[in-house]
Image: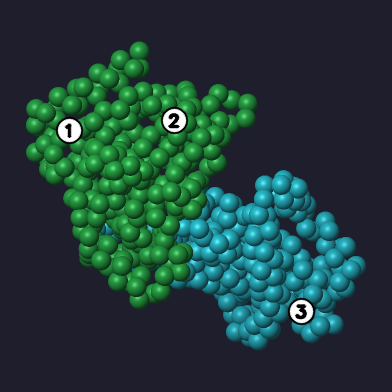
Chain colours: A cyan, B green
Amino acid sequence: MKSSSWRLPLVILGVLLLAWQGGVVGLQVPDYLLPGPLEIAGLIPARAADLASAALVTGGEALGGFLLSGLVGVAVGLFFSVSPLIRRSFYPYVVLLQTIPIIAISPLILLWLGNGSLSVLFISFLISVPAVIVNTTQGLISVERNLLNLFRLGNATVAATLFKLRLPHALPHVFVGLRIAAGASVVGALVGETFAGSSALGAGGLGYSSIYALSQLNTPYLFALILTSSLLGFVFFAVVTLLERRLVGPWHDSVLNDRVD
Amino acid sequence: MLETTAALGVPPFLTIANLCKEYPGSAPVIRDFSLSASTGEFVTLLGASGCGKSTLLALIAGLTPMSGGSILIDGRTPVQARQIMSFVFQDPTLLPWRTVTENVELMLELEGSPRASRAARSAAVLEFVGLGGVGTHYPRQLSGGMKMRVSIARALATTPRLLLMDEPFGALDEMTRNRLNEELLALRERQGWTTLFVTHSITEAVFLSDRIVLMGARPGRVLEEIRVPLPKRRSAALRSDPDFLHLVGQVSRALAEQGS
């Protein structure tokens, strides 16, 4: 990334923060309504340990949900790629899963799995899995006909066709799904915690802490939690993107432009 | 050579007899198609799009079942003969996640040939098609013409005795196409496989072939066979030769007459 592409957004950020701080001080806005950026920044070192432990709880739940959706999503994609009949029979349910607001069914999940991290993990999983299923399936079935013919001409086994053709071809599509799932799993964990978070399990995650901070009208800490949540989401996204560059980059990404003629 | 093998009663390398292909509920795609080719012969199927040329190649490769008739390749059925044939598609059909070398080795790998012999073979074949230096590149780094050469190298890697080519140069610009035509003939001179080549370019057909089979559409069938009495060894200069131009004229007239 070129440094010049960072400069302008940073200037704008600085201007916005200045205006915010100036506005809060000038208009004497009370803290519980809108704290200034300086106050939020000042709070962060003091509560760094709390923020870190909350991020660890939420991060763990989101990671669990993400890994589970990766595993289940790819497995279901493989199952769906077997035949159009299977796809026609089951696909509507994936769409249904995508369209049902997970918040609407979270009380049920609480009822079945109880309060705590397991429910949160499951909500995170439910929110992130459809993207992996849909993209993996698409990748597995969109192999060019002539490439399949080529493998038939080579008398390739089903396993060889899967491992040497279908799966590598699907990999960029799988990563599209995983990137969506990475963001969604963090959102899922945060949403899940607002329902299923419990102080009985310690300090609770970022979502739970937010609800608690709100009830205490501790708005500066609420802002610190929002910042931490954003950072967590960014880390998830960045890790998946890096992994994608490593695995798919050399042959698929537009990173490479040198042609030999 | 054709006359000699016939006189000795040796069956031709490829025999297609009364071949039919139809899909239920629609007009036949190919009807009563017969053709034979002797070892080392270059036969081109020429015709308008939709005349079943590509279907014919798919039938010979056993990629689609026939509805009637028979195809024998060196005494074997299409599926049995897969070990001795290679297919070159219109698209290079390379695997983008594999390097050029790994692409060339694909069919050998599927055959289960050992790593060392694969490496030796792919190096030799890449050298053979003039791509000695690009083995470690990915397909996306290559031009269209080079991708096609890789595709041909992959086809030649298994030392085929029958080469099926389905408009392999159709998507290339004319200059690249001409150059690859010349290269293909030079390669054949050294290895001598039998070729069945599909195209709708008349000049390409005349330049490459020993024999041109004009095909008619709906249903696909043989309209006329035209022998190309040009010398075996052909170079770019042939394209401006009066004999060549005369043949091109003859083939276009035959196509026009049959089409009307």
User: Viewed as shown, does residue B36 lie left or right of A52?
Assistant: left
How far apart marks 1 and 3 lie (CA) works out to 87 Å
- Tell me which residue sits at (30%, 28%) in the image: B225
Q: Secondary structure at mark 2?
A: strand
User: Viewed as shown, does residue B4 lie left or right of B106?
Assistant: left
Write down the residue under mark 1.
Answer: B229
* Rendered location of residue A13, percent (x, y): 48, 64
Give the letter of the chain under mark 1: B
User: Viewed as shown, does residue B235 lie left or right of B58?
Assistant: left
Query: Residue A38, labelled with which disc?
Result: none
Residue extending furthest right?
Answer: A111
Query: Residue A204, labelled with which disc?
Result: 3
* Rendered location of residue A128, percent (x, y): 68, 62
Write down the residue under mark 2.
Answer: B33
What amino acid is found at the position of numbered circle 2 in the picture? Answer: Phe
Q: Quadrant of residue A123?
A: bottom right
Q: Are marks 2 and 3 on the same chain?
A: no
For discs 2 and 3, the disc positioned in front in the rendered view: 2
Give the letter of the chain under mark 3: A
How far apart marks 2 and 3 lie (CA) works out to 77 Å
Q: Residues within 10 Å of mark 1 (few under 14, many from 20)?
A: few
How far apart marks 2 and 1 lie (CA) works out to 24 Å
